[in-house]
Structures are given as C-alpha cells and as structure tokens.
Image (cartoon, rainbow, N blue to C red):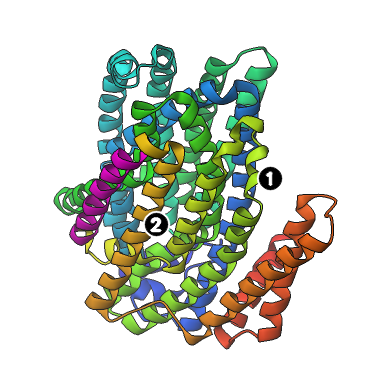
Amino acid sequence: MIKNQRETELGRNSETGSSTTESEVSGQQPSLERLTKQIAKGGGTAFVGNVVGRFFSFLLQILLTRVLGVASYGLYALGFSILGISQTVSLLGLQNGVVRFGAMYRGAGDRARLKGTLLLAIGILLVSVCVVGAVLFGLAGIIARGVFNEPNLTAPLRVFAFALPFYTLVAMASFCARAFRRIDLDVAISRFFRPLFTLIAVGASFLLGFRLMGAVYGFLFSTIIAAGLGLYLLHKLFPDLTSKLQAKYEPKKLLLYSGTVLLVGMSSLLLTRTDRIMLGILSSAESVGIYNAAANLAMQATLFLTSFNAIFSPMIADLFHRGHMEDLERLFKTTTKWIFTLTLPVVLILILFAKQGMLLFGGEFAVGVPVLISLAIAELINASVGSVGFMLTMTGRQKLALANSLTLGVLNVILNLLLIPRYGVLGAGIATGASIALINIARLVEVYLLYHVYPYRLSYWKPLVAGLVAAASCVGIGGLVEFKGWLAGVALLTLVYAAVLILLGLGDEDKAVVQAIRRRFMLSHK
C-alpha cells in the first residue's frame, strides 16, 4: 500500500508542472539548491502571471475612473471594500489552514488526510459564505444610508452580496493550488483569468451604456465564470477529491488553526480596509475614490512580494515541519533580498513619477499624489522584511500574529480617527502607511527572537547603492533634458538600476536564481 501511494505521489505535478521527487514524498531532505530553484521557478511563474493580471486590473481601474468619475468610483470602491471584509469573514481562515496542512500532508504523501482537509474546508466555506452573503444583502440599505450616508450604495452592495460566494470560491481554489505548490494554477485562477474576465465584462457593460451598476454586474458575471474555472482546475489538480479514496478528517486541528488565523485576517483588515471605510464615514465618496486610486497604484509595489510568497509560504510549513531550519533561514535570506531588489525600482518610479501616475486616472485624481508617495514608502518597508508574516503563521505562531495584527489594527483606527478629519485623504495614507511599517518591523523582531533568524545579508548594500545612483541619474538628467514623455524617465531609471547591479556583481545563490528563472522562461517558450 505504501509503495502504491508513493508511486502515485511521484506521478503528481509540482509547482511548475514537473514531477514530485521521491525525497519530497518520503520525507527526506531535498537539497538547498533544488529548493532555491523551486522558489525561483515558482516565483518567476507567479511574477509573469501577476504582471499580466495586474495589467488587466490596472486597465480596469483606469476604465472605471475615466467612465464613472470620482464620486461613482468611490461608491464602487466602498462596495468592493465591504466585499473584501465579507470574504475574509466567510473564509474563516480556512485558506491558510489549507496551505499549511495541505503542504504538510502532501509532503508526507498522506493523500487521505490531504483529501479530508480540502473537502472539509470547502464544505465549511459553502455554509459560511451563504450566511454572510445573506446578511450583507439584508443589511445593504442600513449600511449604505446609516453608516455612509450614501443611499446610492444600496444597490451595488446587494449585487456584491450575490457575488460573494463565487468571489470566495475563487480565493479558496487559488489557495488549494498553492498548497500543491502549483503556482501556475494559483496565478491562472486568481491573478489572470478573474481580472481578465472582469475587464471584459465591465468594458462590455460600459459599451452598452451602463455605468455604476453595469460595472458591478460585470464583476458579478465575471466572478461566476472564474469560480467555475477554479473548481474545474482544482479537480484536475487533485482527482482524488471525487474518487473513492477514503478521506481522513481532522476538523478540530483545522478549525483551531484556521479560527486563530481568521482573527489575524480580520485584524489585518483594520490595516488594509480601515482607510477606505473610515474615509467613507468621516469624509465622502469622492475622497474614497481618490484614495482608492492612489492605493491601487501603490499596490503595484507588492508585485514581487506576493509572487515569492506564493511559493515560499508552503515551503515554510514543510521545512519547519521537517526541522530543516538552516535551509529555511537561507531561503528566507535569498527570497527577501530578491523581493527587496526587485521592489526598490518600482517604488522609486512611483515616488518620482507620482503625479504622472495619478493623472492616468484623470485630472481630478492629481490631489492624491502625497497619498501615493506615503503608501509607496510603506510598501517598500513591507518588501524589505520579506515573508515575516508567513514565517509566523506557517510555523504555528498564529496567536502571536493575531496579537500583532490586533495591536497595529487598533493603532491604525486611532490614527485614522485623528488624521482624516484634519488632513483628509492624506491623513488616511499616513495612518495606514505608518501602521504597515510598524507591524512589519514588529514581525521582523519577533521572528529573530523566536528562531534566531533574520532575512539580511551584507550584499543588501548593492540594491541600495543601485537605487541611489538610478534615482540621482533620473533626477539629474531630467533637470537638464526635456523628456519626450515620462515613460522615458521610467526607462532610464530602470536601465541605470540594472546596470549598476550588474557592475556590482551577483552572488552564487543570486546566479542560481537567475539561471532557474531563465530556464523556466526558455521552457515556457518551447
């Protein structure tokens, strides 16, 4: 029986579509070089999918702002923020439980418990999401008129309530794929097809003459299609989901872990959604629209962080479970350096060309430039500490993660209450930016105190020097030469940054990452 089980596992795909090695199934320690290549290939796959998906999402935001204007776009952003909160509640933290226990059981070759984990998570999710969706639909009028004093928000909220079950299923299917280290499917489900479908559906509704409600219904229809595709791909990934294999359920273990992670997620919403919600309460829909545009632009700085987190987070759970802390530390250092190195030029572009970036949404959005700058700086700090959040939650320290998020979430609420009435959208940006920076610094210190692990190497100075030289060159030449377009400045900064990095030289592990990504792209084009 064990032999047959192992042979089955050996035939399954890993995160890049290649077969799982016997050492991974049997529990033997895979080589550090192989793990580094897995991160590079998986991160490269996630990066490509993220770039394309974010391009579609960015086009959607520009389309929404240009067609709807500041006020109606603010209503859409408010509704979407409430949808995000509802999704987090509906998931009950199960998505992280699936990644953690799914990765552990897959690494141990325990298909029965793997099946039980997936079926249990999906079953509980279907119940919770229907309950939360019904509550949101019933309270839509009260939320719109009583909380935000925006009666026109009622109808969009009710449509978002209908979209909630499908939107949540997309997220769950994506996390299930992540547990299998199938980053290609994770990216395809949540970062490629869903934004593409939404862009097409919303664009079609605008062509037919609809405005705000057309955008909301376009989101609903596209999410239904994406959910169906996600469930289909999940079944293809793990056919045992509907086979006669006897599942082994461990509801207590999954729910205890997921329940704590749910509280972490809810408190994290105090960081990620408080700004928009409180702007809607304390200010106006127009302020929410301006802020949301700036926040969406600043979010592009998280591209590399989310790409590497997608493949590294299940590896954290697997390596920690096996007791391979030395390998985990080295991978932590490698991924953090690459996340920071690749994120720095993006943040410099967002800061130096903040006005041009905000004008993409329309002239009314130019006042959001200071907000964009403050949030971009916060995201650079976020990237500079790497996957510290997952280093806590994926190693069983979810209670500590909860304490972090609750403390900083409450601080974010207090800062927003103090700063929004005085500074408006900029106050929200400063409050959220400061909270993001503080929670990541706290996580960094805690990971070191718990595991004596930190993510930095001496070679960290190389991207810092490259960034300074690139920024100085861009500002200096920009003052002497009239660029034909701001994109020329972006190209200049990128080229100078890359050239300085190459001149300073790459380390051995950096070269291994580059070679793995290059091989991945060469194979994908054959």
Q: Please say if 2 is above or below 53.
A: below
> 10 Å neighbourhood of mark 1: few (<14), some, or many (≥20)?
some
Give the residue number, with chain letter if any, for mark 2.
179
Element on which disc 2 rests: helix
Element on which disc 1 rests: helix
Is residue 391 something one can see in this rendering?
A: no
Inspect the image, locate mark 2, and give the three-letter code of the amino acid beneath it: Ala
Residue 80 occupies which quadrant of the picture? top left
Is residue 178 something one can see in this rendering?
A: yes
Q: Is residue 401 magenta?
A: yes
Q: Where is residue 437 in the image (x, y as percent from the top left)?
A: 38, 59
Q: In the current view of this chain or complex, which residue is farthest to the left?
A: 252
- Nearest to N terminus: mark 2 or mark 1: 2
Q: Quadrant of the N terminus?
A: bottom left
User: Which residue is depicted at the point 28% across and 53% down?
Assistant: 97
Q: Which of 223 and 492 is in front in this view?
A: 492
Q: In the current view of this chain or complex, which residue is farthest to the front?
A: 422
Q: Which of 70 and 56 is in front in this view?
A: 70
Residue mark closest to the camera, 2 vs 1: 1
Q: Residue 356 carries which label?
A: 1
> 10 Å neighbourhood of mark 2: few (<14), some, or many (≥20)?
many
Q: Is residue 207 magenta?
A: no
> Which region is colored magenta?
399-420
Q: Where is residue 198 in the image (x, y as percent from the top left)?
A: 58, 31
User: Which residue is depicted at the point 64% across and 56% down?
Assistant: 352
Q: Please say if 269 is above or below 495.
A: above
Q: In this view, does 354 lie to the left or right of 3?
A: right
User: Which residue is depicted at the point 37% across and 37% down?
Assistant: 422
Q: Residue 156 carries which label?
A: none
Residue 358 occupies which quadrant of the picture? top right
Q: Where is residue 362 in the image (x, y as percent from the top left)?
A: 66, 32
